[in-house]
Image (cartoon, helix red, strand yellow):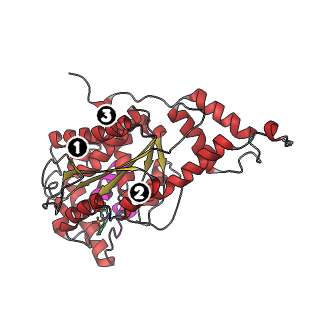
Amino acid sequence: MTDPFWQLPLPQPSRAHYDRALARQQQLTKPPGSLGQLEALACHLCAQQHRDRPAVDRVHVAVFAADHGIAADGVSAFPQEVTAQMVANFAAGGAAISVLARQLGASLEVVNLGVAHPLPDDRGVTDEWIAAGTGNLMKEPAMTAEQLEQALEAGDRSAARASEAGAELFIGGDMGIGNTTSASALASLLLGARVEELVGPGTGLDEVGVARKARRIRAALQRHGSDTDPFNALASLGGFEIAALAGAMIGAAHRGIPVLVDGFIVTAAALAATHLSPNLMTWLHFSHQSRESGHRYLLDAMGATPVLDLDMRLGEGSGAAVAVPVLRSACALHNEMATFTEAGVSDG
Ligand SMILES: Cc1cc2ncn([C@H]3O[C@H](COP(=O)(O)O)[C@@H](O)[C@H]3O)c2cc1C
Ligand SMILES: O=C(O)c1cccnc1
């Protein structure tokens, strides 16, 4: 029996490329450090891509969709049918992530891991269907170990397609009504944090709704909350799309592709993925801080600095897509600025 891919050691970003990139940043015609986070972004991309001139021109966006049994318990402001309707909307080109992917010239893949309702139109949707949504995590495990393996492997297959297409950056997005509940429960368990730190309005619950959602999460944690093994935590509290995201991020890192992490749900998936595969952090960039309460806590717990804070709270990979131009600027500056010597500028 070979080990499953998520247990294999990850490749290391290149220290030599990182050191050369850092040295170049000191030679560019600017006061050292004056490009702030853009300098670190460029250096990390050099190390991850094993290139002296990094690029994120070819971007692969994969939106993973699935339903959640807990959605029947009033934890979202929207009904479950919306998951299927939005999947069709992604593929038809009308969703926010569809627009942003087009604008970036990125490939957009929509992966159905377990949408419960029939799709109005399944053209352009990659079929990785496991079941009609997860189990209700207040009453039962979200999924079986076999289903979790299927979801992780589906994510890895998406990363393989990104690699075959020559992607220089991987973005995972999520769609699944009720998935902020699953993400909060998973993060509370893995971080040993109080539910209040991680629960929020999601698609737009009012205060009473958020209090109800917090009670549901506490009930789920009471049922499943003693086992912090990341595989078991994903099986009891995760979602098919959250597990696929974790698999895709690990799969992208295995293929040397840096990952740009989206908002609350994708960050919770990234947290679980880093618990499965501890060196994954060196492959992740964090795109934005979502408006969803709990995202700040999650980012802080992971020691992550997000690129943007635009009060977005959509998901789908949209925050990551919006941050791509910042990464492109970081690459262009690193690659094209003159050095002090080249420009004949005194370097102080
Ligand atoms: C029309 C629409 C489009 C979306 N696109 C992403 N989400 C986002 O909202 C859901 C999570 O919030 P909650 O846990 O409150 O259900 C996810 O599907 C997420 O990606 C959407 C939600 C809606 C309604
Ligand atoms: O930050 C996110 O990813 C998010 C927040 C609320 C609802 N859906 C997604």
Left or right of 42 in this view: 130: left
Picture layout, residue 309 above or below residue 47: below
Residue under label 2, please give it.
102
**Residue 68 seen by the camera:** yes
Examine the structure image and report whether residue 193 is included in the region drawn in magenta: yes
Q: Which residues are magenta?
A: 181-201
Q: Nearer the viewer, mark 3 or mark 1?
A: 1
**Res 252 quadrant in image:** top left
Left or right of 73 in this view: 200: right
For label 1, the SS is: helix
Residue nearest the viewer, comparing 164 with 12 = 164
Q: Residues within 10 Å of mark 3 (few under 14, many from 20)?
A: many
Q: Splitting the image into four quadrants, where does ligand 1 fall?
A: bottom left
C-alpha span from label 1 to label 2: 27 Å
**Res 251 quadrant in image:** top left
Which residue shows up at 38% across the image and 47% down it?
A: 271
Q: Looking at the picture, how far across and down is residue 268, in whole percent?
A: 36, 52
* Image quarter of the N terminus: top left
Examine the structure image and report whether residue 233 is included in the region drawn in magenta: no
Left or right of 27 in this view: 327: left
Tell me which amino acid carries mark 2.
Arg
- Which of the marked residues, 3 or 2, is nearer the chain's N terminus? 3
The answer to whether the residue bearing label 3 lies less than 8 angstroms from the nearest atom of ligand 2 is no
Q: Residues within 10 Å of mark 1 (few under 14, many from 20)?
A: many
For label 3, the SS is: helix
C-alpha span from label 3 to label 2: 31 Å
Picture layout, residue 83 above or below residue 284: below
Residue under label 3, please give it.
6
Tell me which amino acid carries mark 3.
Trp
From the image, give the main secondary structure of the stretch colored magenta: helix
Tell me which amino acid carries mark 1.
Ala
Q: Looking at the picture, how far across and down is residue 137, in whole percent?
A: 18, 56
